[in-house]
Image (cartoon, rainbow, N blue to C red):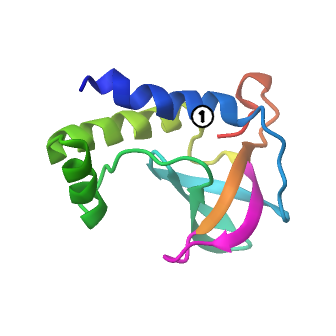
């Protein structure tokens, strides 16, 4: 399977995401500390460091984990290929959001996942029209 075949649905989901109406259950402002990978950010919110899992985005694994091996087995790709795709997804998100960016978090009905990460739609709040969209 070609790399682009796997990545295209991920990028299309990111591009289309902002056009759907939001049914958020609250919103907060936060500051981005770093991009962890293609679907997770580390932020500062209310003086506390938190991880945010982007709602509606599931990218290939970048870091060693059980999920990396499950994804490799499920897709028939080796872990190095999955991680390379994860790196591409992470690099793509880094073109959209940077350390120091102010963001708005809009929560879905469930605010945290089983790992304690915040689950949120993320909207850039820096006022730049070309970057003012949902991740």
Crowd band around label 1 with a 10 angstrom C-alpha radius: few (<14), some (14–19), many (20+): some
Quarter holding the C terminus is: top right
Point 24% across, 26% down: residue: 1
Give residue 18's position: percent from left, percent from top. Answer: 74, 35
Question: Looking at the image, which is closer to me, 113 or 71?
Answer: 71
Read off the residue under disc 1: 14
Q: Main secondary structure of the magenta part?
A: strand
Question: Looking at the image, which is closer to me, 110 or 120?
Answer: 110
Seen in the image, is 53 located left or right of residue 18?
left
Seen in the image, is 8 located left or right of residue 80?
right
Residue 65 lies, with reference to residue 80, above or below; the image says below
Point 50% across, 50% down: residue: 39
Point 75% across, 62% down: residue: 107
Quadrant position of residue 106: bottom right
Residue 114 magenta-highlighted: yes
Task: Tally the numbered discs.
Answer: 1
Give residue 74's position: percent from left, percent from top. Answer: 25, 50
Seen in the image, is 20 located left or right of residue 33?
right
Quadrant position of residue 33: bottom right
Residue 29 magenta-highlighted: no
Residue 53 lies, with reference to residue 103, above or below; the image says below
Magenta segment boundaries in residue numbering:
103-117
Give residue 57's position: percent from left, percent from top. Answer: 55, 47
Point 48% across, 30% down: residue: 9
Question: Looking at the image, which is closer to me, 30 or 116?
Answer: 116
Give residue 101's position: percent from left, percent from top. Answer: 66, 45
Residue at disc 1, secondary structure: helix
């Amino acid at each position: 399977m070609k790399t682009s075949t796997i990545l295209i649905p991920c990028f299309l989901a990111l591009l289309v995401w902002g056009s759907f109406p939001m049914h958020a259950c609250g919103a907060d402002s936060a500051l981005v500390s770093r991009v962890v990978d293609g679907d997770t950010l580390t932020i500062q919110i209310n003086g506390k460091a938190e991880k945010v899992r982007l709602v509606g985005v599931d990218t290939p694994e970048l870091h060693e984990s059980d999920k990396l091996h499950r994804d490799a087995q499920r897709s028939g790709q080796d872990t190095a290929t999955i991680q390379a795709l994860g790196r591409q997804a992470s690099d793509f998100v880094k073109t959209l959001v940077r350390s120091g960016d102010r963001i708005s978090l809009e929560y879905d009905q469930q605010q945290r996942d089983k790992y304690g990460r915040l689950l949120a739609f993320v909207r850039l709040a820096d006022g730049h029209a070309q970057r003012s969209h949902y991740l």
